Image (cartoon, grey):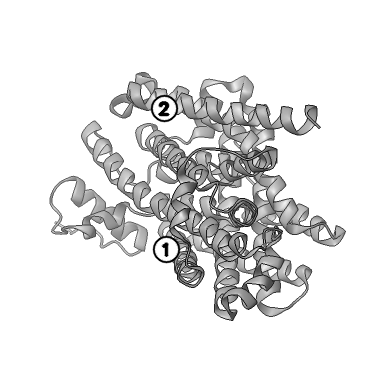
Amino acid sequence: MSSAPTPTSLDERLNAEAVSILANTSKRRGLARLTPFLGPAFIASVAYMDPGNFATNIQGGAQFGYLLLWVILGASLMAMLIQNLSANLGIATGKNLPEMIRERWPRLAWPYWIQAELVAMATDLAEFLGASLAFQLLFGIPLFWGAVLTAIVTFSLLTLQKRGFRPIEIAITGFVFVIAVAYLVQIVLSRPSLSALGGFIPRFEGTDSLYLAVGIIGATVMPHVIYLHSALTQNRIPATTPAEKRQVARMSRTDIFMAMGLAALINLSMLAAAAAAFYTTGNSDVADLTVAYRTLTPLLGGGAAIAFALALLASGLSSSTVGTMAGQVVMQGFVRFSIPVWLRRTITMVPAFAVILLGLNPTSTLILSQVILSFGIPFALVPLLVFTGRREVMGELTSTRTVQVLGWLIAALIIGLNAYLLVQTFVGA
């Protein structure tokens, strides 16, 4: 009898190990047992610390001190719940959220695809501009050539998809840890005060703080990554029985807790470092990423400025790559159509190059894009809640009543904040 072929690729080796863990035949113990199941949440987490987060968090910290820390914490907790639902959908059904919408609500497939693509363009605009700006800050080159370098690097990262999903997961996770280390340096150098704890008391100070809060939520609970996470977990680990799916779902929750927890700490660090460096030193007018970079050197030293720029670069490159992956999922899922990844990458670069060539302020554009993202959240969140609450869809992974109530409260909160912002910004003005 011939023996089974030895797995050769990283995906095959880790999948084989995952199967043995599900069958309780693996010799792995402790954290090693988690390794084959980790990855999807770290890719999703990049969207929660992209350049849009930098723009909103730094402006929020500079203008309002520690006031909006509670918004970041709340948005991060929302993100954990939402990403867990998205991951469970892929595990339970073997389909991603766009595919489920097309299958269950076929008449909405095309309208949903159009709005999802518009949101994806806003997403990519923020991510691409952030990386381009980081190249400019680090190397002193024009923003246009920073954009060209961003395009080259993201094209290179996307080629990793040809080797399977785990090589790109490893690359993206590496970027996440670069961001984490950079902001650890920022926190050490800026030394936030204990008064930061007051920032966890929910409150606002005028329409401007509400505008930034909605931007923070848009930058944290991002619609395109709600679609993407379900695609990252669908059929990733061979799990056929209800028991195996429950076990994969448990491993997925650990993945989410680790990745989203790290993203939450990074976001809190961004705002706290900005508050300590700018707000408490009388530099509350620092609302621009370039100004923030230049102001950090005299305040905290060149090391803090370089750490900031490196974090922004890692954020922009990784999140731009993830945004392109999400765009592929959206198009294939909603309308069963796909285009080469290089073509999608080229098309989604156009708005960013337009902003650069028109001379628009990159930071203002980043913040506006995050508010646009916030308005796209209900379109992804509502069907996710509907599907994950149906036993005929989810089987053993159907959401509990408590999770459903929390999910609908989150959706109502986000929609309510958006409506209030519109009234205050336009009618009030």
Residue shown at the point (50%, 63%) measured from the top left: 160
Residue shown at the point (56%, 31%) measured from the top left: 414
Counting from the top left corner in percent of width and height, residue 97 is at 50, 33
> Which dot, 2 or 1, sits closer to the camera?
2
Q: Taking 401 as reference, is 86 above or below it?
A: below
Q: Taking 250 as reference, is 186 above or below it?
A: below
**Residue carrying label 1:** 170
Q: Secondary structure at mark 2?
A: helix
Mark number, residue 351: none
CB under 8 Å between discs 2 and 1: no
Counting from the top left corner in percent of width and height, residue 211 is at 67, 40
- Out of 244 and 424, give the one closest to the viewer: 424
Which quarter of the image is occupied by the N terminus? bottom left
Sequence-wise, the earlier of marks 2 and 1 is 1
Which amino acid type is marked by label 1? Ile
Residue shown at the point (76%, 69%) measured from the top left: 143
- Out of 141 and 290, give the one closest to the viewer: 290
Q: Quadrant of residue 152?
A: bottom right
Q: Taking 130 as reference, is 382 above or below it?
A: above
Q: Is residue 408 left or right of residue 214?
A: left
Q: How many marks?
A: 2
Counting from the top left corner in percent of width and height, residue 27 is at 13, 59
Residue shown at the point (58%, 34%) measured from the top left: 377
Q: Is residue 137 left or right of residue 303?
A: right
**Residue carrying label 2:** 406
Counting from the top left corner in percent of width and height, residue 93 is at 39, 31
Which amino acid type is marked by label 2? Leu
Evaluate whether residue 110 shows in this view. Answer: no
Crowd tier of the residue under label 2, counting other residues whose Cα lies within 10 Å: few below 14, some 14–19, many 20 or above: some
- Out of 138 and 357, give the one closest to the viewer: 138
Which quarter of the image is occupied by the C terminus? top right
Crowd tier of the residue under label 1, counting other residues whose Cα lies within 10 Å: few below 14, some 14–19, many 20 or above: some
